[in-house]
């Protein structure tokens, strides 16, 4: 088991370096020389050159990349072109807000999808199943930012139950979280249903029923436990989409998270902030996926057995 | 040896035809898929004939200050926007952008992904490893952020939007193609083709890839839907099709500014996106059930 964890951790290193390189290279294509942008129109050639060195923009792409990685390992993501603030500090300031939004969104998704998926599976091919599947399909087909706008319209502007933006108090996180959560809920409902359907056909459930275990207990105790395994996997994989989706929700609801930071930085052509925030977010996703995989291997004895050999 | 080969091939072709026929028969029985197909055909026709119905310069982007901010009525069934343009006209015209971006983006992803994936599966070894690790790298960057980064680097334009969304959706195609190649790579008929000296590219194209066509069709249909959503998201953030083009996402972005008093402006473009993506999802799900009953999500 430890071998497995160590192997996965080691495999993480090239992926993270690759992620950093891809993002670094993409942002490097960005048009316009940032030195001019920072220096202003009156700077002399010497000042420009000095600034170029100071900003770490001299040398080839690879040289700059390795310098960036060197600094990244020390927790230094450079300085924002616009606010002149430390990018790592900016990122860490925003991260808790995004994590709050993301975790609540995932909670919303589970609360909606698991019961809905179970009901659909247990009542397969009845109106309940059809209804659940139609709801899931609509949830999958709806752009989340549009759902956000509709929620804002109804619950913030018309009914006034929640604030329409900002991050003050618990009430303000609810609409953005539902916005992000519904798409995930749609996907999870489908997963829960098909996973439950697979499990419900298993022989051990027939045995449990034959022993006289109540139907309720068969479903919630015997079936759900095994059905949860694929659900957990999807959940981990979707963390990346939740963070992606929160970029939109943060824009709609003016939520001061990482997504907002990136979008604003792009508007201002603030490349260090964009690069840093993207790299950090991707690392977060990768690490969360790793943790999910490890937990998954730990929980499922079949997988655990594969690696303890 | 040769005889066995032609026989395998003949039975293969026979089987392939009947699979397609059976798939269509199954698809026809699937109500959802047929609804999706009909909706999609209507949307495609609307997109194709839009330039015949409306003049781009006067009807779609031309200002008409007298008619601005009119709520939906008989004259304007979806109302008019802040510049007095008929929203229904713009939505119909906007189908051209959404469908084009969705299709081209997925086509880019499909071509690059299938080529890389099948090469990786067929060649194997270090090459396969490198391709799959690159795939890991690309799938660990959240696709919205990936597309945002690409557009912000390349600049805002419709073509760049297609490229950005395409890059962000390539990895799944690499995986599907590679998996399909791995399944049949060591089959006897592939070995036979190799034995009679067929070039590798021909073996992959003629003997291996046809096996995963159905999976690729399903994947592509579902991906066009998510590509349309991604494109609308980027346009909503101001990173997509530049104004004044009637892109649904950017129509929602301008509607958002007037959401308090003119809510209809945020309603209709969103419905258009939803119906388009819904029809693709219905069709994609139906195709998946028809082509591969084993494949379940």
Image: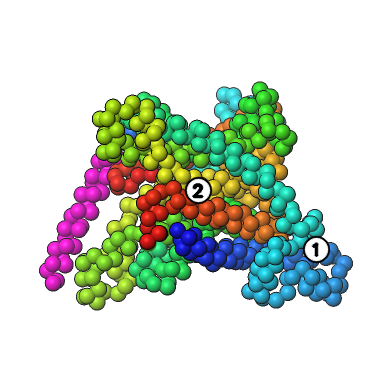
Residue A114 location (% of width, % of height)? 45, 34
The C terminus of chain B, quarter of image: top left
Residue A14 location (% of width, % of height)? 54, 67
Same chain for the residues under marks 2 and 1 in the image: yes
Q: Which residues are magenta?
A: B1-29
Q: Choose top left, top right, bottom left or bottom right for residue B148.
A: bottom right
Q: Secondary structure at mark 1?
A: helix
The N terminus of chain B, quarter of image: bottom left
What is the magenta segment's predominant secondary structure? Answer: helix
What chain letter is assigned to the residue under label 2? A
Residue A147 location (% of width, % of height)? 57, 35
Q: Residues within 10 Å of mark 1 (few under 14, many from 20)?
A: some
Q: Which mark is residue B96?
A: none
Q: Which residue appears at 84% of the width and 63% of the height?
A: A40
Residue A53 location (% of width, % of height)? 78, 73
Q: Which residue is mark 2?
A: A236
Q: Which residue appears at 67% of the width and 25% of the height?
A: A161
Q: Confirm whether the magenta stretch covers residue B19.
A: yes
Q: Which mark is residue A38?
A: 1
Q: Which residue appears at 26% of the width and 34% of the height?
A: A207
Horizontally, residue A119 falls left or right of residue A250, namely left
- Alpha-carbon span between mark 2 and mark 1: 40 Å
Q: Disc 2 or 1, which lies upstream in sequence? A: 1
What chain letter is assigned to the residue under label 1? A
């Amino acid at each position: 088991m430890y071998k497995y964890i160590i192997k996965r951790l080691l495999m993480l290193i090239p992926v993270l370096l690759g992620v950093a390189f891809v993002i670094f290279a993409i942002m490097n294509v960005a048009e316009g020389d940032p030195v001019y942008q920072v220096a202003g129109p009156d700077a002399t050639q010497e000042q420009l050159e000095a600034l170029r060195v100071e900003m770490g923009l001299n040398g080839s792409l690879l040289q700059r990349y390795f310098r960036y990685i060197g600094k990244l390992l020390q927790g230094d993501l450079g300085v924002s072109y616009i606010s002149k603030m430390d990018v790592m500090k900016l990122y860490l300031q925003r991260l808790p807000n995004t994590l709050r939004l993301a975790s609540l969104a995932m909670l919303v998704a589970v609360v909606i999808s698991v019961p809905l998926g179970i009901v659909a599976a247990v009542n397969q091919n009845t109106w309940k199943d059809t209804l659940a599947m139609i709801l899931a399909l609509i949830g999958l087909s709806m752009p989340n930012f549009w759902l956000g706008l509709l929620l804002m319209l109804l619950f913030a502007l018309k009914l006034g139950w929640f604030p329409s933006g900002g991050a003050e108090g618990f009430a303000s996180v609810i609409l953005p979280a539902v916005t992000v959560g519904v798409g995930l809920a749609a996907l999870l409902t489908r997963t829960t249903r098909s996973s439950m359907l697979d499990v419900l056909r298993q022989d051990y459930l027939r045995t449990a029923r034959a022993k006289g275990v109540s139907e309720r207990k068969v479903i919630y105790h015997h079936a759900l436990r095994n059905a949860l395994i694929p659900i957990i996997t999807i959940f981990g994989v979707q963390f990346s989409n939740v963070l992606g989706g929160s970029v939109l929700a943060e824009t709609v609801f003016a939520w001061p998270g990482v997504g907002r930071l990136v979008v604003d930085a792009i508007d201002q052509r603030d490349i260090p902030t964009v690069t840093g925030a993207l790299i950090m977010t991707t690392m977060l996703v990768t690490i969360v996926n790793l943790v999910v995989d490890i937990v998954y291997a730990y929980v499922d004895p079949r997988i655990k057995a594969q690696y303890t050999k | 040896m040769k005889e066995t080969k032609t026989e395998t091939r003949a039975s293969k072709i026979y089987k392939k035809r009947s699979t397609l026929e059976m798939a269509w028969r199954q698809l026809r029985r699937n109500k959802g898929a047929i609804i999706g197909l009909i909706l999609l055909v209507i949307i495609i026709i609307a997109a194709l004939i839009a330039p015949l119905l409306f003049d781009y310069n006067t009807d779609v982007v031309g200002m008409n200050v007298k008619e601005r901010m009119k709520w939906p009525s008989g004259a304007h069934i979806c109302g008019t926007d802040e510049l007095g343009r008929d929203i229904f006209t713009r939505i119909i015209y906007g189908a051209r952008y959404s469908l084009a971006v969705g299709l081209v983006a997925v086509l880019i992803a499909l071509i690059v992904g299938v080529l890389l994936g099948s090469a990786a599966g067929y060649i194997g070894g270090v090459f396969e490893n490198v391709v799959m690790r690159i795939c890991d790298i690309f799938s660990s960057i959240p696709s919205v952020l990936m597309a945002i980064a690409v557009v912000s680097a390349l600049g805002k334009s419709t073509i760049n939007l297609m490229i950005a969304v395409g890059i962000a959706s390539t990895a799944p195609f690499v995986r599907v193609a590679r998996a399909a190649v791995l399944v049949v790579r060591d089959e006897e008929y592939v070995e036979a083709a190799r034995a009679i000296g067929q070039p590798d590219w021909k073996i992959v194209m003629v003997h291996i890839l046809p096996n995963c066509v159905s999976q690729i069709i399903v994947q592509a249909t579902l991906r066009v839907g998510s590509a349309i959503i991604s494109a609308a998201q980027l346009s909503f953030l101001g990173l997509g099709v530049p104004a004044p083009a009637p892109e649904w996402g950017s129509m929602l972005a301008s509607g958002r500014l007037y959401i308090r008093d003119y809510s209809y402006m945020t309603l209709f473009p969103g419905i258009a996106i939803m119906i388009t993506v819904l029809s693709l999802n219905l069709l994609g799900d139906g195709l998946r059930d028809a082509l591969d009953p084993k494949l379940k999500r």
